[in-house]
Image (cartoon, helix red, strand yellow):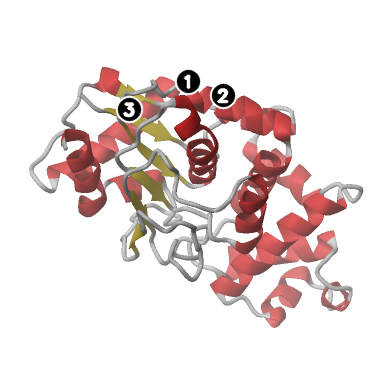
Amino acid sequence: MRKLVLIHGRSQQNKNAVALKKEWLESLNEGLSKSGLKLPIPESDVRFPYYGDTLIQMVDGQSSDAAAEIIVRGNPVDEAQNRFRIAVLQEIASRAGLTEAQIAEASGDDEVLRRGVLNWAWMQAILTAMDRYVPFASGSSIALFTFDVYQYLKNSNIRAHIDEGVSSAFTPGIESVVVSHSLGTVVAYNCLVQRGHLLGWKTPLFVTLGSPLAVKEIKKSMASLAPMRCPQCAGNWLNALDPRDVVALYPLDKEEFPINPDIPSIENLLDVNNSTENRHGIAGYLTDKRVAKRIHDALIS
């Protein structure tokens, strides 16, 4: 009997892991019902490694709104973090079609643009502009996302703590379908690539939903941790995104996310209609009929 491992993204701090798992499974079962199917394994065979509280500890337990305000103000001493996060924001803004005029209007100060992007007034302006001009975007959520992904990729202690927790969901030699979302796709990919083949994991299907893996700065950082490849323990890889998702900017294809070797290649599902408010929520991905059926079929194959 195969097992199912669900790896969540950010904004899950201070929540009940049991309740979160239930939410994921309810959405998955809704997607399965569209094909007349049900989850083919007992819930006891579904693992939901929870690391949300580790992320919120990064900002000393502040609420999401307070944390976003702290993060946007930034730490001018940490130039590496500033460069990383601003590069990601630039890419998100460009893909969303934000103009310099819109950013300037959001700032209320033309000097912000003249000083260039490596300043925090620019960051505040672009986040405000996203709230104002980009459908489904949330400036505070994007600020928190860029902070969390930087901490995971660049802070080896945080990364090791999260990876250990996620790894505990796997049993060597037992086949486990892995479904990941948002920041969780970064965590899952890193764990599978670095640990899977060494620890005897078997992953017949690796699913990434709303993934930022192809964002240039994130991709570059991932490549510095390990060669870009399909995890050796994975038999197949399915990536799904809603084109309106402001975090999942690109498909994981040969142009945007080249892997070597590219066998098995990544299958991209690029027309998900994610009905959640921000077009990025996990429920809108798991209720997709095709995504749900692929997970089902991988669990019974």
Pick the residue in front: 66 or 230.
Answer: 230
Q: Amino acid at mark 3?
A: Lys
- Disc 1 is placed on an element classified as loop
Rendering coords of residue 39 (x, y %) = 18, 32
Question: Mark 2 near mark 3, Cβ–Cβ under 8 Å?
Answer: no
Pick the residue in front: 221 or 261.
Answer: 261
244 to 147, vertically: above or below: below
Instruction: Give the residue displayed 25% in from the left and 42% down from the top.
Output: 295
**Crowd tier of the residue under label 3, counting other residues whose Cα lies within 10 Å: few below 14, some 14–19, many 20 or above:** some
CA–CA distance in space, label 2 to label 3: 23 Å
269 to 223, vertically: above or below: below
CA–CA distance in space, label 1 to label 3: 19 Å
**Residue 277, labelled with which disc?**
none
Q: Which residue is mark 2?
A: 164
Rendering coords of residue 75 (x, y %) = 86, 47
Q: Amino acid at mark 1?
A: Ser
Residue 15 visible here: no
- Disc 3 is placed on an element classified as helix
Rendering coords of residue 143 (x, y %) = 67, 51
Q: Which residue is mark 1?
A: 168
Q: Amino acid at mark 2?
A: Glu
Q: Quadrant of residue 252?
A: bottom left
CA–CA distance in space, label 2 to label 1: 6 Å
